[in-house]
Image: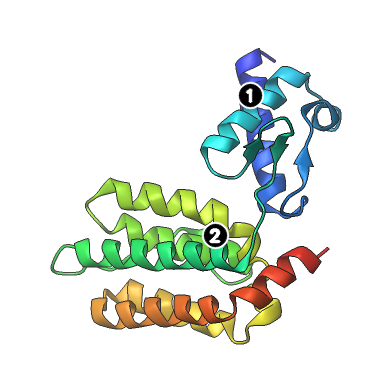
Amino acid sequence: MNSGATAERVHEALKARIMGREFRPGDRLDPAVLAVPLASSVTPVRDALHLLTGEDLVETRTGDGFHVPALDEPALKDLYDWSAELIALAIHAWPRPHAAIVFHPRAQDGHPIAERVAEAFLGIARRSPNGEHARAVDRLNARLHAVRTVEAHVLDNVDAELAAVTAAAEAGERNLLRRLNTAYHRRRRRAAAAIVRAVYRAD
């Protein structure tokens, strides 16, 4: 395996572990410690951590290396607000008439809610002719993935809520989707403190 393949493999493996909540917010990520289970030397791990820092999935602290970003209520509210604004921008940019949206098969029932939410919002963003909307939503999906895995511990009816969003998007119902997008994110914003506690508490 060449060094490029190793670096890519390590990056994807670490990204999946962070998104899957194998680390808690604030945890230190030591390249030497991580290299062993990743069957890698330290250099590709360090390179991967730098890439993940650029993706806002990892942060660096002066004199203390790499860490999973800490999470608090104001920061989570900011992320929810940014998500709502991005989706609203994408909907506003939809061309007329509104063709149906075809979602990726991963968005269907039976898959984890975090994956289905990510695919639904990415499908909405891809309907915009501005490719930056989809790129921004894809990046934000990764940052919110761990949070979305615990939202159902705090909020009820998350499956029905997502089904309504998906149905409106598939039908191209722009005005309904705007209202659902606002309600979806407002509900989570109100519960942000409890969701943060669930992220830190979850195994």
Element carrying mark 2: helix
Give the percent coordinates (x, y) of residue 176.
30, 83
Residue at the spot 49% in from the left edge and 77% down from the top edge: 162
Residue neighbourhood size for the residue with mark 2, other residues' Cα within 10 Å, grouped as few (<14), some (14–19), many (≥20): some
Left or right: 178, with 18 as reference point: left
Outermost front residue: 62
The residue furthest left is 96
**Residue 153, quarter of picture:** bottom right
**Res. 7 visible in picture:** yes
- Amino acid type for the residue under numbered disc 2: Arg
Mark 1 is on which residue type?
A: Asp
Instruction: Say if residue 116 shows up in the picture.
Output: no
Q: Which mark is residue 106?
A: 2
The residue where tag 1 is placed is: 47
Residue at image coords 67%, 37%: 61
| Residue 91 badge | none
Q: Nearer the viewer, mark 1 or mark 2?
A: 1
x and y percentages locating residue 78 in the rendered image: 48, 63
Q: Is residue 129 above or below residue 75?
A: above
Out of 165 and 80, give the one closest to the viewer: 80
Counting from the top left corner in percent of width and height, residue 80 is at 48, 67
User: How many angstroms separate mark 1 from mark 2 (CA)?
Assistant: 30 Å
At 38% across and 47% down in the image, what residue appears?
135
> In the rendered view, does 94 fall on the left or right side of 200?
left
Outermost residue on the top side: it is 2
